[in-house]
């Protein structure tokens, strides 16, 4: 079972959890809410914290707390930005008719395939957004954390060729367009085409997977280095590597597919011919969706996971480095996926297959890009959704504020007030501006006498008296988009 490391206090390892054990990745934290020993001395856990902090035995050490290795805290602005990002992604998934599922966080296998096999499901469109955890060592300097969000969309079932696959690509296009991350390109290929290329280049089938993993490095390494690895490390002959290079450096659209269908070698390979036929059909559907201009048939795309059986794809963000560069360069993958028709059968006791195609959105990388963009622009991110601040201009009106804010809460209005008996009006209005709260509902002695509430538009700095019984309706009217 994957477990969190110990709490680090002043360089010392402090056991956490009941009876000094280390806490597992369980969602239950009930043990934290109760002492593990006698109430008088607060139990072993509390004594250890005090000792480590230097408060026991008369010591005077500094308390230094750290998050577990490979993780980080997220302040309110980060969480608000991530919530906005996740909401956009989930809205797209729902727009395409997907239902949400949730699987155990501790599962180290492929949860969706296991879920389908265990529940004997043969037809499903689902999405899953959740925190997951890497088993390998994190590389936080490259934005690779042990704890991260994963957003998956999958279509399971036996359907006509390329229709679900085209929808997955449409979803990626919609999400990247909605988020306005800049120019992007979605690369597509097919594992059957790749395997066909390897076959016609006389590569032994036993070396298909290792050769595939080397080809996958072409987006990060020049062909000369990839060729050197094929020959020097993977044991391919120089001639075979050169023949592979003639194919995997090609990219284009329907014209390239038509050309490869006429290739004297590939056209004789059954797998390659099937893959090219489906790729042609896929591009016809993508053209109907109006997104073919953002799709590139790229024979260098391999995707390392060996469970893919058909179409594979990867979305990358592009940037123009300078005026002398003719083509935009990739700055990183932000989504990827493909078809995996055999995976569910690996979990099914009778080996029953359920064809599947899916996509995973790289939320963490997209979040890092948005985070940098917000920081560079100086944009202030709202961390709350408060719509109204209830304020008073004079002293001794706490009761009036409490009564009014209760009325707003009961009506479903998101409202706040300052936790002081007699706050200054200027301070209350400044809080509205600092927190981006659009309206202030001001109730003073005169307003109470007249039976009205002064509604202030914080941005416009305009005020109007509203009859108290009409306040909720007026706020709702003003909040309408």
Image (cartoon, helix red, strand yellow):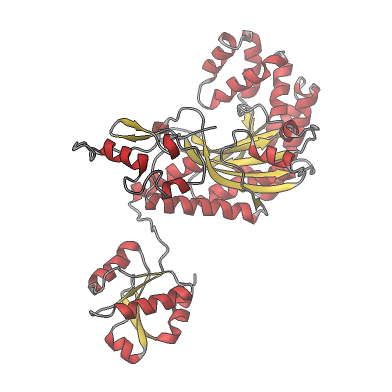
Q: Residue at x 24, y 72 (%)?
A: 423
Q: Residue at x 70, y 34 (%)?
A: 340
Q: Is residue 57 left or right of residue 301?
A: left
The part of the image, by quadrant, that contains residue 421 is bottom left
Q: Quadrant of the N terminus?
A: top right
Q: Residue at x 40, y 85 (%)?
A: 468
Vertical comparison of 393 with 171: above or below = below
**Residue 155 vs residue 56, the one in the foreground:** 56
**Residue 261 vs residue 470, the one in the foreground:** 470
Q: Residue at x 33, y 42 (%)?
A: 46
**Residue 81 vs residue 447, the one in the foreground:** 447
The part of the image, by quadrant, that contains residue 456 is bottom left
Residue 37: x and y, percent?
39, 43
Q: Is residue 26 left or right of residue 99?
A: left
The part of the image, by quadrant, that contains residue 299 is top right
Vertical comparison of 147 with 78: above or below = above
Can residue 40 be seen by looking at this rendering? yes
């Amino acid at each position: 079972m994957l477990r969190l490391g110990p709490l680090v206090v002043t360089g010392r390892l402090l056991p956490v959890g009941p009876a000094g054990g280390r806490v597992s990745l369980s969602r239950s934290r009930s043990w934290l809410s109760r002492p593990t020993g006698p109430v008088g001395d607060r139990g072993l856990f509390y004594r250890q914290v005090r000792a480590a902090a230097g408060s026991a035995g008369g010591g005077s050490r500094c308390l230094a707390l750290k998050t577990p290795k490979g993780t980080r805290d997220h302040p309110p602005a980060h969480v608000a930005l991530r919530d906005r990002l996740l909401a956009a992604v989930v809205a797209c998934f729902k727009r395409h008719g997907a239902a949400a599922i949730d699987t155990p966080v501790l599962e180290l296998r492929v949860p969706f395939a296991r879920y389908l096999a265990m529940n004997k499901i043969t037809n499903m469109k689902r999405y899953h957004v959740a925190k997951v955890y890497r088993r390998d060592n994190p590389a936080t300097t490259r934005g690779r954390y042990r704890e991260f969000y994963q957003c998956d969309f999958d279509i399971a079932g036996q359907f006509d060729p390329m229709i679900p696959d085209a929808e997955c690509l449409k979803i990626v296009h919609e999400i990247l367009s909605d988020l306005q991350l800049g120019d992007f390109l979605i690369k597509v290929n097919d594992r059957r085409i790749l395997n066909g290329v390897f076959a016609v280049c006389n590569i032994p089938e036993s070396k298909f997977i290792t050769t595939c993993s080397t080809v996958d490095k072409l987006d990060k390494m020049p062909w000369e280095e990839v060729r050197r690895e094929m020959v020097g490390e993977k044991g391919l002959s120089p001639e075979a590597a050169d023949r592979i290079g003639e194919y995997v450096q090609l990219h284009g659209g329907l014209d390239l597919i038509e050309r490869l269908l006429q290739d004297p070698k590939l056209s004789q390979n059954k797998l390659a011919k099937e893959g090219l036929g489906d790729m042609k059909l896929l591009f016809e559907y993508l053209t109907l969706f109006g997104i073919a201009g953002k799709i590139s048939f790229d024979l260098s795309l391999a995707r390392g996971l060996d469970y893919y059986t058909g179409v594979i794809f990867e979305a990358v963000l592009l940037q123009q480095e300078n005026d002398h560069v003719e083509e935009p360069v990739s700055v990183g993958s932000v989504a990827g996926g493909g078809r995996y028709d055999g995976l569910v059968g690996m979990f099914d006791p009778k080996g029953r297959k359920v064809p599947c195609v899916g996509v995973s959105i790289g939320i963490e990388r997209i979040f890092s890009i948005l985070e940098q963009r917000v920081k560079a622009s100086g944009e202030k991110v709202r961390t709350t959704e408060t719509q109204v601040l209830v304020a008073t201009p004079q002293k001794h009106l706490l009761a009036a504020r409490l009564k009014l804010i209760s009325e707003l809460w009961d009506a479903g209005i998101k409202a706040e007030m300052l936790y002081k008996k007699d706050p200054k009006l200027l301070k209350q209005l400044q809080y509205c501006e600092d927190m981006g709260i659009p309206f202030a509902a001001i109730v003073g002695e005169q307003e109470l006498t007249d039976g009205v509430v002064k509604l202030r538009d914080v941005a416009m700095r305009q005020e109007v008296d509203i009859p108290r019984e009409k306040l909720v309706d007026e706020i709702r009217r003003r909040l309408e988009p």
